[in-house]
Image (cartoon, helix red, strand yellow):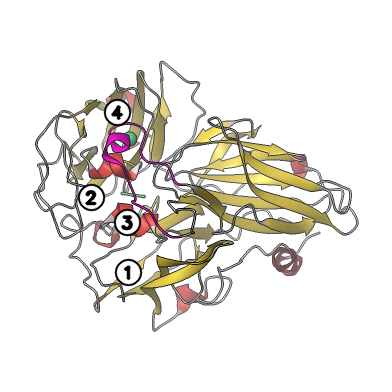
């Protein structure tokens, strides 16, 4: 039998918390803290390439890379954001179904946090799983330069693994000298978005992690890049998907070129090879240049574990939509030829290329539109989303979870999610219970699309 102690040991051996410690105790220490911990947003530099430190990075906390924030399901969590950047920022808790006032969207849910100021976040995460946190202000620059970290919400009822490895998967727009280049090109923003030039996991190019041979590793990964969509594959070991976007998969399935877009998360069971020294590789096979994102090296004598013996993940208290009583709401994505948006405190890219229901809104530009829909608390709604554009869009809804159903383009796995990757010419239904009051942003998580019009919000009253 594995105990928490062996789990922790395994995790340390696996280097799972590289850059992720330092905030508080390993298991929800923050939750019980009377004086909330502080998370500093600050400028910094980082060793991303072998060309020396990259300057002009933005990060959270004391380490180079933003810490993995650990919380426990159903336990109070509090954190003070201390903004030491020289521009306003906020924190959005992507995928966490929390109070609207804690959602981190300037104008809609909270004031800007100016440089030198702070903001107290406090909430109780209702769901266990893998989530992430990032600013909702000048996001192309702030996320693009580093402000994105993972959130792990633990449930004591979860099965115990031999190790856990958390991966923050993202790119950087760096030139040959390892320094930042222009974050975007307008002609690319009007298409798939502008791609980074250096690919990293936990801010390292193709890092290697050690884990017990023949052991079961919980791999928690998040696609935090501003642009890139991945098609993930594990080579040299068996990897099974156990949760999608924070919530347990109804049936587990082998990782096989699974596409995830910016904002999405996956929890995998990686069954390590039996032979000491054998290496498994997590690859992105999308596009013309396959990339090895991270590798995993087996250490010690084989534990001879079997992924099929792993009990199910603890269940989250998700609201089941009442389809018979649902109201349908259309959302049509499109390109937009609207005039330029006004500049705002949270930065505008200076263009409107995209729209939802013909309304382009560059979110934090200070001229909020009306909500695209008003929903009654507790009622079921079906978002009928159509994507007649030639691009794939990871559509993200704040504060609520939906169940994708009935796509004309892809087989839908039954699960709850906060981000849906809609394909060109796809029509899909997203069913949800509007059980969390407030104004909730609904936007594409390709940040250039978000910032050039593909943003809206819905209101739950
Ligand atoms: Cu991950 Cu509105 O964001
Ligand atoms: Cu998009």
Disc 1 from disc 2: Cα separation: 18 Å
> In the rendered image, which residue does mark 3 sit on?
141
CB atoms at circles 4 and 2 under 8 Å apart? no
| Quarter of the view holding residue 42 | bottom left
Quarter of image, ligand 2: top left
Q: Is residue 127 visible in the rendered structure shown here?
A: no
Is 158 in front, or is 177? 177
> In the rendered image, which residue does mark 2 sit on?
437
The stretch of residues the image draws in magenta is 179-196
Please tell me whether residue 430 is drawn above or below residue 148 in the rendered image: above
Disc 4 from disc 2: Cα separation: 17 Å
Specify the label residue 382 is tagged with: 4
Of pointers 3 and 2, the one earlier in the residue sequence? 3
Residue shown at the point (91%, 56%) measured from the top left: 301
Q: Is residue 323 visible in the rendered structure shown here?
A: yes
> In the rendered image, which residue does mark 1 sit on?
121
Disc 1 from disc 3: Cα separation: 23 Å
Of pointers 4 and 3, the one earlier in the residue sequence? 3
Q: Residue furthest top?
A: 408
Secondary structure beneath label 3: helix
Of pointers 4 and 2, the one earlier in the residue sequence? 4
CB atoms at circles 3 and 2 under 8 Å apart? no
Q: Left or right: 69 with respect to 254? A: left
CB atoms at circles 1 and 2 under 8 Å apart? no
Nearest-to-viewer mark from 1 and 2? 1
Nearest-to-viewer mark from 1 and 3? 3
Q: Left or right: 439 with respect to 142? A: left
Disc 4 from disc 3: Cα separation: 34 Å
Secondary structure beneath label 4: strand
Nearest-to-viewer mark from 4 and 3? 3
Specify the label residue 112 is tagged with: none
Of pointers 4 and 1, the one earlier in the residue sequence? 1
């Amino acid at each position: 039998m594995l105990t928490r102690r062996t789990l922790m040991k395994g995790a340390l051996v696996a280097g799972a918390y590289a850059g992720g410690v330092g905030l508080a105790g390993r298991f929800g220490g923050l939750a019980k803290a009377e004086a909330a911990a502080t998370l500093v947003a600050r400028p910094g530099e980082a060793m991303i390439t072998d060309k020396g430190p990259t300057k002009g990075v933005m990060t959270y906390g004391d380490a180079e890379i933003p810490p993995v924030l650990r919380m426990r399901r159903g336990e109070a969590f509090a954190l003070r954001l201390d903004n030491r950047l020289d521009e306003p920022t906020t924190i959005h808790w992507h995928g966490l179904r929390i109070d609207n006032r804690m959602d981190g969207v300037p104008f809609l849910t909270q004031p800007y946090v100016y440089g030198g100021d702070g903001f107290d976040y406090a909430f109780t995460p209702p769901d266990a799983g893998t989530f992430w946190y990032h600013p909702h202000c000048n996001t192309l620059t702030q996320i693009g330069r580093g402000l994105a970290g993972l959130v792990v919400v633990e449930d004591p009822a979860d099965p115990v693994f031999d190790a856990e490895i958390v991966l923050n998967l993202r790119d950087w727009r760096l030139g040959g000298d390892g320094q930042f280049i222009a974050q975007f090109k307008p002609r690319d923003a009007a298409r798939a978005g502008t791609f980074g030039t250096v690919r990293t996991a936990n801010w390292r190019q193709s890092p290697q992690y050690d884990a017990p041979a023949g052991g079961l590793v919980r791999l928690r990964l998040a696609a935090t890049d501003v642009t890139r969509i991945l098609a993930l594959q594990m080579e040299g070991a068996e990897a099974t998907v156990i949760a999608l976007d924070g919530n347990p998969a109804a049936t587990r399935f082998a990782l096989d070129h699974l596409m995830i877009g910016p904002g999405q998360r996956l929890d995998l069971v990686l069954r390590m090879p039996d032979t000491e020294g054998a290496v498994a590789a997590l690859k992105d096979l999308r596009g013309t240049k396959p990339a090895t994102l991270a590798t995993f090296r087996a250490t010690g004598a084989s534990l001879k574990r079997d992924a099929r013996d792993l009990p199910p993940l603890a269940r989250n208290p998700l609201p089941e939509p009442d389809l018979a009583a649902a109201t349908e709401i259309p959302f049509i994505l499109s390109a937009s030829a609207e005039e330029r948006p006004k500049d705002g405190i949270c930065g505008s890219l200076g263009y409107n290329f995209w729209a939802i229901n013909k309304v382009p809104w560059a979110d934090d530009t200070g001229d909020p539109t009306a909500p695209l829909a008003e929903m009654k608390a507790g009622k079921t709604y079906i978002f009928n989303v159509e994507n007649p554009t030639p691009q794939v869009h990871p559509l993200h809804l704040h504060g609520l979870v939906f169940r994708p159903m009935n796509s004309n383009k892809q087989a839908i796995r039954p699960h709850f999610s906060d981000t849906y990757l809609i394909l060109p010419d796809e029509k899909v239904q997203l069913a949800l219970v509007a059980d969390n009051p407030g104004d909730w942003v609904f936007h594409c998580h390709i940040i250039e699309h978000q910032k050039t019009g593909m943003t809206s919000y819905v209101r739950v009253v």
